[in-house]
Image (tube, coloured by chain):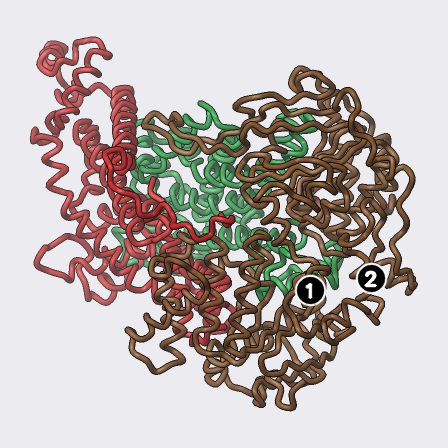
Chain colours: A red, B green, C brown
Amino acid sequence: MSSVTENAPSAANSKATGQDFIAGLMPLLLQLRKLAWLLFTVTTLLFFLLRAAGDPALVLAGNDATPEQLAAIRAQYGLDRPLIIQYFSYMWNVLQFDFGKSLASSEPALEKVLDMLPRTLHLAGMAIGFTALIAIPLGSWLGFKPENPERRAVSGFLFIMQGVPGFVTALVLIQVFAVNLRLLPSLGYEVADPRTWILPTASLASFLFPSLTRVVAANVAEAMREDYIRTARANGATQSELLWGHAVPNALLGAAALIGTQFAFLLGGSAIIETIFSWPGMGWLLLESVQTLDFPVVQALAFMIAIMVFSVNACTDLVFRYLDPRLRTKGA
Amino acid sequence: MSDVKSNPAAIIDAAKNEMNPLSVQGRFNRAKLKQVANVEIVIAFILFTIIVVLALFGSFFQTHDPMQGDLMKRFYKVGQDGYILGSDHLGRDLWSRAVAGLQWSMACALTANIINLMIGTTLGLMAAEREGWARTIIRQITDTLQSFPFMVVAIVVVVIVGHGFIPLVMTLGLLSWVVFMRVVYAEATSIYQRDYVKAARIAGVNRFAIMFGHVLPGVRASLFVIFAFHFAGLLIAESALSFLGIGAPLGVPTWGNMLAESRQYLLKAPGMLLVPAGAIVMAVITMNLVGDGIASLSRKRGRSIDV
Amino acid sequence: MSTNPVVHVDNLALHFVSADSVVEALKGITLNIGPGEVVGIVGESGSGKSVTALNMLRLLPRGKTKIPHGAVSVLGRDVLAMGEKELQKVRGGEVSMIFQEPMTALNPVLRVREQMFDVILRHQKITPAAAEKLSIQLLQDMKIQDAERVFNAYPHELSGGMRQRVMIAMAFSCQPKLIVADEPTTALDVTVQAQILNLLKERAKATQTSVMLITHDLAVVAQLCDRVYVMYKGKIVEEGVTRDVIGDPQHIYTRALLNALPEGKTPKSRLETVAAAMIEGGDKVAATPITASAQAGFTQFGRAQPLFEAVNATVRYAKKYNFFGRPISYNTAVDHVNLSLYEGETLSIVGESGCGKTSFANSIVGLVPLAEGELRYKGKRLQDHDEITRREVQIVFQDPQSSLDPRWPIWRIMTEPLTVGKTPGRSELRETAEGLCQLVGLDPRSIDRLPHEFSGGQRQRIAIGRALSVHPRLLLLDEPTSALDVSVQAQILNLLLDLQEKYQLSYLFISHNVAVVRHISDRVAVMYMGKVVESGTAEQVLTNPTDAYTRTLMEAVPTLERAFAAA
């Protein structure tokens, strides 16, 4: 750190040589390695788990198929080969993004999943936007002076909100707004009708909103105790400059690591919310296909979800690496 | 003294500690109880006691057989004819069913939570102790589990392994220990870097003696806190899975099943929704309160005991 | 003193209040600072000096403090009566502050540019272009050569010393009448400290700014301040012109504080402790005379076989990893160090942060592996000894907070090493702990207490007791006193000297504090960037250094003697 060579310029302005280029790619390579490992594990585990669960031939043929029909189907789908061979041929297909055809509708499984993707993203996007819009200002306000009586009351309310599971919120919202007040439709998804979006979005947002607000509040409160806040106060900064200029940016950068896990949590929640509201997204499809033992679709879904969570994580990582000066220059 | 920062909060704390260094010392006494007992902790304690009593001696409080309905007494209102919280579409007592649901959920969440605690703590300690293949593998597994929405994993696995108490508990128990592992790993890693652990290592103290003498007691407070919060999470997960029709077997009186049944009678009998919904919310809030309470207690202790 | 003081604090009392307690932090203090005057406020932790500083700008949380009586006026205006709006104009404008921790005092997500603009544009009506020019000028005034780069850098890209220069530049940016500097160099290395203090003094003289310097270090006061106030437990016990106060202290606390300093005392003599002086109210000014056996310590080297030897000891840390996680480049923390230590002597390793002295200590006790070379104990490689012999080498760490398990009673802490390989009974261990307590000067009845019930100095005694439990021959002392107040430091040094005399212990004493090293060592090795640049007897190395770095280091150390010689 500090030594006699005080005035020497730091190594920050190094030239871009070939070695640096490779070093710059390192984080990307490491991320890709992680993704590959993740997809491999997920696909492998699911393959054996699903095979342990039931015979796909039985599902295809139906319950009252004759042994001859079953044998024919096995031969047709290659299910008569040893399991390990099936596994390798399956993995080979997965490498080419071929998950086989849906057992229910004989569409390609991946296509079926990709059809659902935009709707899930739509719902998740709305919920995240809604949450961020409220959680950040509210959390900052709460964290600025956590001891105030009115802010403590709001915190208490958030604490109770946090105890209400999202699917319970969804049911209560349906009860109130769809059944009792008849203001909003209780289920279904119409691209053109924003009224169908409101309840699902509110329900899904209720998964995130209370906990996220509390995290922002805690981070802001912590940032307010930092030394640089004291410095800024000693320099004559006003209360709002302290909060918005100093504490909040630091607090939000600190909360960044949370985004990835919260997104995974949100996708899990959307499986339930989509089912409740018959919102034809990936979560809805997951329950449908899992219950009908539509293995190829489940596999494709798991694959896609893993990729989605991973890329959200990687992207936030990248964005915050860019936004947070400490990470930016530190590099790998 | 050079290392006390001239931060106002730190100064005040330091000043108070100097004045009253023994404030936390001593066994339970009234003064100490007064000091720690705030409103939230009192509420948490009362609610928690109620839940424990209902879970242990539920049948004593049930007014009806939770499984047995009377089709002549469908959709009774609150308090009507001895049905404390009314009856459902088959004429079964909602109160008794809610109590039965509590027993089911508690048993399920508690068992799963204990499994989680054991797996997560063991793996966390192993990974924290030293670098090596064990740490690499454990962290890799944790990362994989974590980069997957738990609900999605649970849905797939539960459907495959089948309905029932044991499959549900095993699914929740074997797949949701990540939070334990992560917290234990983080805290244990920092404890392993403390000078008192170094001193023990230098003195040649056995690695298990260090692990169980210094490290595990150091993470114990956090373990209690996570145990409570995670308990709430497991209650939610269990009822969500049952609600989706893939957790508890159909017909068993659980909160999730009750909620699922209520959906067709929203207009006719809002109580069928509100009773189990209220039960879940109360249980979850109680566990969250307990977690918060333990956290604030250990913070209070920690202010004078730990660094 | 001038008739129009910049600061006038009159009989000020300040209490910290909470629901269950009231702590009297200041008990009626009165002080004045004239225009252009540099005034030191010196005291140990808990004396109320930082509270005084923070209260100048009302930076303490209002809800938690109460001011029963007294007044603070800055430039003739009553600070205590000001509203938040008015205070904001004063803060950073007429009065500015410099804090202790340069690593955390700047906002990590804003560049120096934004943070300087923040102050300048708030208090001055100038264009951003003019503000930039002014900022760079200010940074250049702080002898920063590449001011442009620093101006556009983020705090984490700058060293601690550089950040403190930026803080000082910011403090001077709005031509304040007063600068309050709260331990501005405590977190820095001596060589950097010397530069920063000189800059602060220079700029204050050049701009005729008054400075209120809060510090625990009497030598810094002597070097910098025109006048000094000595604080003890919330009161000002002595004030006056620096030279008079330090040269001829009137109050027993000031006297005791000066006597507790190792500087200028006979090496290895026992230092007088503040506690003893305050309790006995005695007038013992002279340090106790040097003992015969301590004298003997000087003549001990030159024996045939050293107790401990380092031969080409080298420690490396991996710096970069390749794709497969294998290290591809290293930082060398300890670079081919050769040292030897004889029975009953003290060898000190002096150096600044990052010089490798702690890595070296860690390698001796096996916490870090050696990359090259070897460590010999009693002629055999350390790792070839059995467990019991290896345990004759023990360590005492710097931070008494982290070196004791907060959940263990101290009898368990002190006897933990004895439980290795066997399980002695509880009563046996407790008995041993009582004995160890007596040995290190603690009350044997306190063995059931937890570490948080002890002060920093007492904890350090516990740590020493633990090391002694296995009858060590060699103690590694890694900055054992640098987290302690001067008076407590004196107690610990006395204890170490007593123990050495009693048991003929060998010490490897690691420190950045030259005065302490001079006091306790027989021989000294100076480390710089992983290498031993100079070694020899304490007298020779510390008084007549031959190496260029050692000379720089010695010149940078603030001493009372030099301060008065210069004045």
Does residue A317 sit above or below C160 in this rendering? above
Q: Are marks 1 and 2 on the same chain?
A: no
Residue in the foreground of this view, choosing between C286 and B147: C286
Q: Foreground residue, B36 or C404?
A: C404
What amino acid is found at the position of numbered circle 1 in the picture?
Ala
Measured along the vertical axis of the image, is residue A218 above or below residue C84? above
Q: Is residue C40 left or right of residue C302?
A: left
- Which residue type carries mark 2? Ala
Residue sitting nearer the eye, A313 or B181: A313
* Residue at (40, 30) in percent of width and height: C329
Q: Can you tell which mark lies on residue A139?
A: none
Q: On the image, numbered disc 2 is attached to which residue?
A: C256
Check disc 2 and report its element: helix, strand or loop: helix
What residue is at 85 percent from the left and 47 percent from the top? Answer: C269
- Provide the chain ID for the residue under circle 1: B
Residue A126 visible in this rendered orientation of the protein: yes
Q: Where residue B10 sits in the image (x, y, percent)?
A: 60, 62
Is residue C145 found left or right of C448 in the rendered image? left
Q: Is residue C129 left or right of residue B70?
A: left
Q: How far is disc 1 from disc 2 in space, using C-alphas?
A: 23 Å
Kindly check if marks 1 and 2 are in contact, taking CB atoms under 8 A apart as contact.
no
| x then y, percent, for residue C66 | 65, 78
The image's mark for residue B15 is 1
Residue C535 occupies which quadrant of the picture?
Answer: top right
Q: Residues within 10 Å of mark 2 (few under 14, many from 20)?
A: many
Q: Residue at x 37, y 61 (%)?
A: C147
Q: Is residue B259 visible?
A: no
